[in-house]
Image: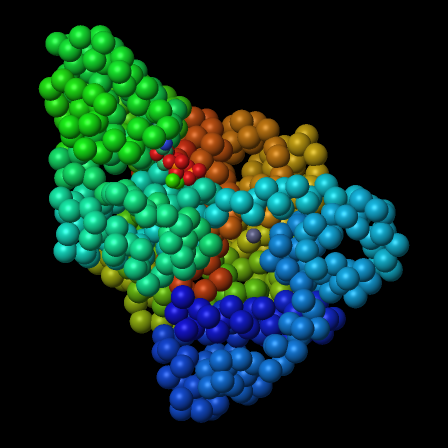
């Protein structure tokens, strides 16, 4: 965690506690300041060294917050925050993991009933104490009770977006060690699953001890869980990180094995057996000349403890027969007559057969993305100006960028959403920002001079409109018609039943002005289940209507998920991968969306924003 991240987290905690104690407006100010501190290029401790005025130079950081930041950097604590913490000694993260429970509810329930933990919340709800608190009713109480198991369950697995940066940091550290020949992440994180149980890392090296020792000394590790011969586990950022060190000539086989999934591995291993081969974490072996007794001695490659047999002389027959592959992972697949299988597909959902037939999809890659179709600015709930967001898109070398702030409507907080007059006003502001930002041009006619060289980012004015509970779009048609692009998303009534959700989303994708269905279910990973529509029916309607299905790349959402993308691609629908960025740095989240689309077998040709600006225009014109 950088110092800026650390201060931002404190300001966010501050905001939650203020909100819990019933303070108005201030929490929003603290959250916006947090966002800007996190994003700020200069280290906050340097600014603090220069004094409060320097800190207050950060956008949306006023004098009061600047003073608190200086206090923190100088003393290691903020008095007022400490006081709030002792006034409200609650497990905020645990309690707010329950859908429908926000900081304010946490504050009220602490004051009335002294609830500080999830267990206490559950006990109080079961005892019927919550419905007695003013402002709460029997309905709220039963909702809380219903949502507690999900909240508890969800806190066991780490979201990909939280784990991936930890894995990347560990990988960079290990790859840099002199004794490491090669290093890779494996397990569910290499498959880009939306949540992960633990992080798995693999290193190839002739000398295991120095690698294991260096790993336990990794500065970002909070504790060592265990350390043995050739393997170790540490805890970092609340997640378990497993390391295995293997011989370089066995690295490919180990990588294939430890990437999983188990179901994929079973299918691949069966293919090996059919060909008189034996596949395990040590290699691929030709066992046609080996007698059955030797094979039976270790036939269960899955046996618990088999990993401990590392010495070639006491490997219990794991390295039996003639080695035909194992140094590289591609070599393992090729020796089995298969195309190498991209990790995202390894769930035994047809990829083994496709790889054998040579028909694996040409998956979309992150560098194929040419622009973001769903981004926010400070005109709604984003933290940055239109010009700042356009400049960030230009910096990334995108061909185009869509400004799509929230329209007013159900589920959009307070007055953060734009009404029709404000949308018209914003059109002028977008034009002004385009004129101001170097390397930006207005979304022009095809063949626009500035875009021909490919250097400029074409800016489209869009909107994120709201789909109400019945599937109507809550912004006027005339306004929608004037916009370059309309993303329509559900933000309210996310607990409605499946039939209603299906009808709602079908009606939305069939709306003539809707171009993209944004975060179709509205789920938040580990915190809100979201809508549960009949996915096939929705994607078929989208394909027929020419409306794209969004993969929202915000790692809290990843919505549509891989399974829904697969259904959409099978139905012939178009996919859009968007970050929904509220800050420049969030444009980087695009990779989470792309890898989710890959889990859904999406090819480059399926993805709307992998097309040229002209291709995008053509889609929008239809
Ligand atoms: P996770 O951590 O729960 O998100 O899921 P994974 O897939 O990362 O599972 P993990 O960490 O238990 O093991 C990593 C990979 O190693 C797993 O995907 C497949 C492989 N593996 C581990 N143990 C076994 C086993 O007993 N049998 C088989 N076939 N594969 C295993
Ligand atoms: Ca794992
Ligand atoms: Ca593991
Ligand atoms: Zn949204």
Q: State the residue in front, 173 or 576.
A: 173
Q: Residue furthest front?
A: 314
Is 274 above or below relative to 214? above
Q: Is residue 359 left or right of residue 327?
A: right
In the picture, measured across the screen, residue 241 lies left or right of residue 520, that is: left
The residue shown at (47%, 52%) is: 554
Q: Report whether residue 540 is seen.
A: yes
Which residue is drawn at the image coordinates 47% and 54% (left, top)? Answer: 238
Could you tell me which residue is drawn at 44 percent across and 51 percent down?
239
Which colour style is shown?
A: rainbow
Q: Position of residue 506 (x, y in %)?
A: 60, 34
Identify whether 450 is placed above or below 510: below
Q: Residue at x 40, y 81 (%)?
A: 45
For the N terminus, give its image quadrant: bottom left
Residue 590 appears in view: no
Q: Residue 395 or 355: which is nearer the viewer?
A: 355
| Quadrant where the image shows the C terminus | top left
Pick whichever, 526 or 221, lies toward us.
221
Q: Position of residue 424 (x, y in %)?
A: 56, 64
User: Would residue 307 be found to the left or right of residue 616 on screen?
Assistant: left
Residue 134 x/y as whole percent: 87, 60
Left or right: 114 in relation to 363: right
**Pick the front one: 203 or 350:** 203
Q: Quadrant of residue 268?
A: top left
Residue 442 in the image: state x and y as whole percent: 38, 62
Locate ligand 2 by image quadrant.
Answer: top left
């Amino acid at each position: 965690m950088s110092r800026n991240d650390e201060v931002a987290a404190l300001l966010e905690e501050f905001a939650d506690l203020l909100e819990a104690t019933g303070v108005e407006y201030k929490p929003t100010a603290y959250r916006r300041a947090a966002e800007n501190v996190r994003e700020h290029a200069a280290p906050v401790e340097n600014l603090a060294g220069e004094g409060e005025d320097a800190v207050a130079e950060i956008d949306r950081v006023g004098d009061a917050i600047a003073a608190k930041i200086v206090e923190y950097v100088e003393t290691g604590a903020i008095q007022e925050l400490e006081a709030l913490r002792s006034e409200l000694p609650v497990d905020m993260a645990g309690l707010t993991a329950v859908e429908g429970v926000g900081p304010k509810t946490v504050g009220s329930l602490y004051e009335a009933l002294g609830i500080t933990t999830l267990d206490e919340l559950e006990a109080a709800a079961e005892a019927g104490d919550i419905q007695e608190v003013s402002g709460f009713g029997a309905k709220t109480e039963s909702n809380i009770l219903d949502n507690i198991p999900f909240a508890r369950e969800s806190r066991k697995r780490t979201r990909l977006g939280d784990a991936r940066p930890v894995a990347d940091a560990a990988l960079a550290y290990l790859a840099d060690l002199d004794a490491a020949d090669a290093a890779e992440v494996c397990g569910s994180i290499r498959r880009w699953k939306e949540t992960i149980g633990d992080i798995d890392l693999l290193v190839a090296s002739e000398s295991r001890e120095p690698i294991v020792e260096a790993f336990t000394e990794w500065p970002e590790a909070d504790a060592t869980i265990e350390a043995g011969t050739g393997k170790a586990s540490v805890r970092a950022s609340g997640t378990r990180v497993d390391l295995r060190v293997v011989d370089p000539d066995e690295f490919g086989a180990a990588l294939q094995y430890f990437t999983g999934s188990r179901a994929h591995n079973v299918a691949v291993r069966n293919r090996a057996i059919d060909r008189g081969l034996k596949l395990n974490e040590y290699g691929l072996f030709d066992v046609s000349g080996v007698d059955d007794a030797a094979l039976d001695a270790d036939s269960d490659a899955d046996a618990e403890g088999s990993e401990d047999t590392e010495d070639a002389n006491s490997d219990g027959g794991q390295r039996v027969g003639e080695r035909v592959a194992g140094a590289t992972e591609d070599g393992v697949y090729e020796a089995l007559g298969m195309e190498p299988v991209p990790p995202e597909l390894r769930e035994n959902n047809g990829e083994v057969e496709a790889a054998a037939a040579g028909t694996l999809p040409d998956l979309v890659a992150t560098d194929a993305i040419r622009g973001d179709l769903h981004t926010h600015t400070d005109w709604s709930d984003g933290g940055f100006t239109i010009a700042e967001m356009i400049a960030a898109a230009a910096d990334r070398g995108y061909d185009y960028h869509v400004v799509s702030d929230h329209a007013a409507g159900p589920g959009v907080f307070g007055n953060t959403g734009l009404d029709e007059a404000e949308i018209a006003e914003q059109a002028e502001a977008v034009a002004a920002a385009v004129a101001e930002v170097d390397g930006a041009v207005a979304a022009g006619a095809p063949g626009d001079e500035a875009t021909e060289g490919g250097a400029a980012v074409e800016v489209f004015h869009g909107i994120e409109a709201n789909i109400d509970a019945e599937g109507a779009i809550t912004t006027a048609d005339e306004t929608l018609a004037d916009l370059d692009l309309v993303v329509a998303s559900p933000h309210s009534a996310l607990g409605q039943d499946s039939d209603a959700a299906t009808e709602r989303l079908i009606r939305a994708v069939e709306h003539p002005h809707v171009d993209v269905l944004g975060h179709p279910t509205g789920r938040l990973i580990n915190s809100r289940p979201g809508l549960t529509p009949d996915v096939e029916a929705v994607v078929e309607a989208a394909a027929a209507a020419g409306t794209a299905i969004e993969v929202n790349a915000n790692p809290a959402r990843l919505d549509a998920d891989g399974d829904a993308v697969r259904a959409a691609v099978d139905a012939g629908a178009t996919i859009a991968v968007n970050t929904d960025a509220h800050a420049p740095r969030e444009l980087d989240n695009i990779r989470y969306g792309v890898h989710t689309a890959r889990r859904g077998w999406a090819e480059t040709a399926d993805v709307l924003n992998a097309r040229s600006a002209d291709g995008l225009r053509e889609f929008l014109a239809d």
